[in-house]
Image (spheres, grey):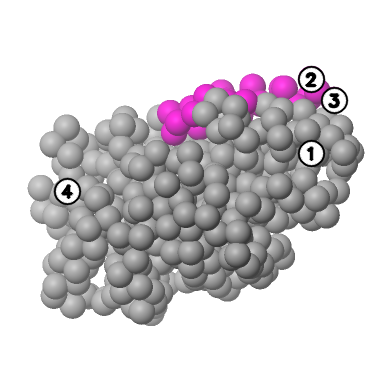
């Protein structure tokens, strides 16, 4: 259970064209903040059937003071982040009379944020979106950066758009209702941010793990804020992933492939945790990383209660095949964002992306 943090100050982090507001109990100010960041005639709140019953009704009631407001739901889970759900929600907005003077509000975890963001990116050729993440993973990573999209049978997020939010509003108090496995899964992205950009932060996350797993509010506020600073700083320098932003993909090429091969029975953060360990071993194997780095990453992830090995229910060859559908593959070759040591990424001279032979990847997977 999260500890009370009424005394904790609210922070606003500059993410470039928008701000990220982080605090405890700030959801009671969401309507005012939304109306200030993206005033609209119509507010369309998109949530799922798990988060919606907990938090959507109070937000809708508050937003009604600022304009017409409707609520729209999707089924929870990665398997519902599809073009079919996008189509249904888009039709619902049209039926509700939404026009270009609409602001979409994404209230939920990473799945809701990705899909609602894609609805906003494509509805009337683009309307504003406000991200209100309710999972630790979405707060730390998914809500910041403007990536939106849906999954297809070929892989994750292969249909989407860059559509930065007008604001990101984070209330860590909503993590009270987040199941323990989801909180642990969110920690994978915090570990990733330390590996790719800040060795001191990596060590800090490791030291805070007991408090983070227990749901200590000051610890969570500290980690969410630092992760947002790291990610927003990277994104501001490379908004459309043509260069340094690629380092954010560490753990995701293999992680996404394992997530898909598991038929999404693994949480995203769990799959990324496995992906980080395997890609770190890959970095050591091809000689771009210090020996022992993968073991250090693995140890912290194990302490966080996350998986670090490929599930036996997934086949190594199938996982390898899924990597070829990754967004980062070019001309049939799969590239990886690989660290050279904790806090530093390799491959700056190669555009932050290193091609690795399938045979070596298969060795690591096996």
Magenta segment main secondary structure: helix
> Which of the numbered marks, if any, corresponds to residue 309?
4
The residue positioned 36% from the left and 42% from the top of the image is: 180
**What SS does tag 1 mark?**
helix
The residue positioned 46% from the left and 51% from the top of the image is: 2
> Image quadrant of residue 42?
top right
User: Which residues make up the magenta segment?
Assistant: 73-97
Residue 236 lies, with reference to residue 277, above or below; the image says below
How many callouts does the rendering have? 4
Q: Is mark 3 in CB contact (under 8 Å) with mark 2? A: yes
Res 252 seen here = no
Q: Please tell me which of labels 4 and 2 falls first in the chain.
A: 2
> Which of the numbered marks, if any, corresponds to residue 97?
3
Which residue is denoted by mark 2 in the rendering?
95
Pointer 1 local density, CA inside 10 Å: few below 14, some 14–19, many at least 20: some
The residue positioned 55% from the left and 25% from the top of the image is: 49
> Which of the numbered marks, if any, corresponds to residue 342?
none
């Amino acid at each position: 259970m999260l500890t009370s943090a009424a005394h904790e100050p609210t922070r606003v982090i500059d993410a470039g064209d928008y701000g990220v507001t982080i605090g405890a109990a700030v959801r009671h100010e969401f309507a005012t903040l939304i109306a200030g960041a993206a005033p609209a005639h119509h507010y369309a709140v998109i949530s799922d059937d798990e988060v919606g019953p907990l938090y959507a009704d109070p937000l809708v009631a508050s937003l009604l003071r600022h304009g017409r407001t409707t609520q729209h739901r999707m089924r929870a889970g990665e398997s519902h982040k599809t073009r079919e759900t996008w189509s249904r929600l888009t039709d619902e907005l049209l039926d509700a009379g939404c026009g270009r003077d609409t602001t979409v509000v994404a209230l939920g975890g990473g799945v809701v944020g990705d899909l609602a963001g894609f609805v906003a990116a494509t509805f009337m050729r683009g309307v504003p979106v406000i991200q209100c993440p309710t999972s630790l993973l979405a707060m730390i990573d998914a809500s910041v950066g403007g990536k939106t999209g849906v999954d297809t049978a070929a892989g994750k997020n292969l249909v989407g758009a860059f559509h930065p939010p007008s604001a990101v509003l984070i209330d860590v108090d909503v993590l009270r209702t987040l199941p323990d496995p989801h909180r642990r899964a969110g920690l994978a992205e915090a570990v990733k941010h330390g590996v790719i950009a800040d060795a001191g932060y990596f060590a800090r996350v490791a030291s805070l793990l007991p408090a983070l797993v227990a749901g200590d509010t000051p610890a969570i506020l500290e980690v969410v804020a630092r992760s947002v600073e790291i990610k927003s700083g990277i994104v501001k320098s490379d908004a459309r992933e043509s260069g340094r932003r690629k380092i954010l993909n560490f753990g995701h090429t293999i992680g996404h492939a394992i997530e898909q091969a598991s038929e999404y029975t693994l949480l995203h953060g769990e799959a990324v945790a496995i992906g980080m360990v395997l890609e770190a071993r890959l970095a050591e194997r091809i000689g771009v990383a210090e020996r022992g780095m993968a073991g250090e990453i693995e140890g912290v992830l194990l302490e966080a209660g996350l998986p670090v090995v490929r599930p036996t229910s997934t086949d190594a060859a199938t996982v390898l095949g899924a990597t070829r559908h990754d967004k980062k593959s070019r001309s049939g070759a799969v590239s990886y964002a690989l660290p050279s040591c904790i806090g530093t990424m390799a491959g700056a001279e190669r555009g932050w992306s290193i091609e690795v032979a399938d045979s070596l990847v298969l060795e690591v997977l096996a």
